[in-house]
Amino acid sequence: MMTFHNPEYLFLLLLLIPIVFWYIWEMHKSEASLQISSHRNLVQFPKSGKIKFRHVPFILRTLAVTSIILALARPQASNSWRTQNSEGIDIMMALDLSGTMLAEDLKPNRLEAAKSVATEFILSRPNDNIGLVVFARESFTQCPLTIDHAVLINLFNGVKYGLIEDGTAIGLGLANAVNRIKDSKAKSKVIILLTDGSNNAGDIAPITAAEIAKTFGIRIYTIGVGTTGIVNIPVPTPIGIQYQQVQSDFDSKSLKEIANLTGGRYYSATDNSKLRRIYQSIDQLEKTKISVREFSKKDEQFYVFSILAFILLSLEILIRNTVLRRIP
């Protein structure tokens, strides 16, 4: 990378413009004229070699002046190195796939809203290992911890209702997430649990899973998604999609207890914008620590242009005193 310590000297290059015009004007005035009846017979005579080289001294001098100006501007070649040490955060996301996640109080529904906002969250954390666990009546790992977020997002987009038998096994989903992240070497380990119901399946109680997480130093952020009360859930029928009204409620007390026990936080997301703000809040709380060291070294390059100017001027003097030498 080339920079100039005194770039203001580069404005001197503008002086070359009037110099070029002056040279052209002088050459035009200095042309000799001879009146003859016809120049037809002169065409057969070849031009002298000196005529071909007559502009070379001026070109060499112009280039020499340019080199001197560049040398005055003190060109510098800079080499820089950048080292980055990042303290990665490992994050497992536990997503509820129960039937009530199809409720349309969030747009287009709770599940799709959760997937969309979670994708934005993943893209904002390029330095972190992130994985995905899904749960309903059972739980399985959709994607283990990975830094390849393109693969993770593709797997995230493939999540849909019906992959698992309906139900809400929060404890089982948490236990699965804990099992996936507990052996991580990262200094910070986090689980983000998103659900819209109360635990009604599985052999592991949510509080038990939270206590296990605490043992391994894992923080859990819990998100209760959706509004409480009567919500409409689409149900496929032979005559098309019909809506069924069901009572929506989730055990906020248990979710708060899980978060408090592990040093995390509990959030309630009743619409898309609030869900997005929740993920932004978690993003701020769990910032990756990065330390950057920069080194820069600059080498003076003016001598290159100084030597070039000397060579060009020497060539000009040589040509003027040999090939283009004038004899009085």
Image (spheres, rainbow, N blue to C red):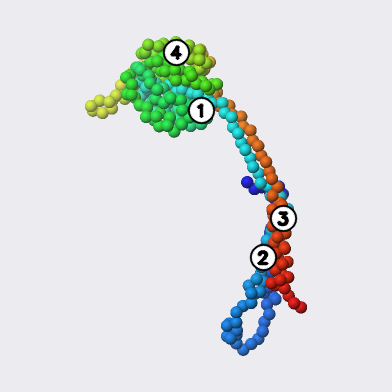
Q: Which residue is mark 2?
A: 59
The residue at the far left in this view is 238
Dot 1 falls on a residue whose secondary structure is loop
Q: Is residue 303 visible?
A: yes
Indicate the quadrant containing the C terminus: top left, top right, bottom left or bottom right.
Answer: bottom right
Dot 4 falls on a residue whose secondary structure is helix
- Asked if residue 152 is positioned above or below residue 249 in the image, the reply reads below
Instruction: Name the amino acid type tagged 3.
Output: Ser
Give the spatial CA distance, label 4 vs label 2: 83 Å
Q: Which residue is mark 4?
A: 209
Query: Comparing marks 2 and 1, which lies closer to the viewer?
Result: 2
| Left or right of residue 282: residue 236 | left
Give the spatial CA distance, label 3 vs label 2: 17 Å
Dot 2 falls on a residue whose secondary structure is helix
Task: Please name the residue shown 50% across and 24% down the image.
Answer: 90
Counting from the top left corner in percent of width and height, residue 319 is at 70, 68
Give the spatial CA distance, label 1 vs label 3: 51 Å
Along the polypeptide, which appears first: circle 3 or circle 2? 2
Query: Comparing marks 4 and 2, which lies closer to the viewer?
Result: 2
Q: Which residue is mark 3?
A: 306
Between 295 and 12, the residue placed more toward the observer is 295
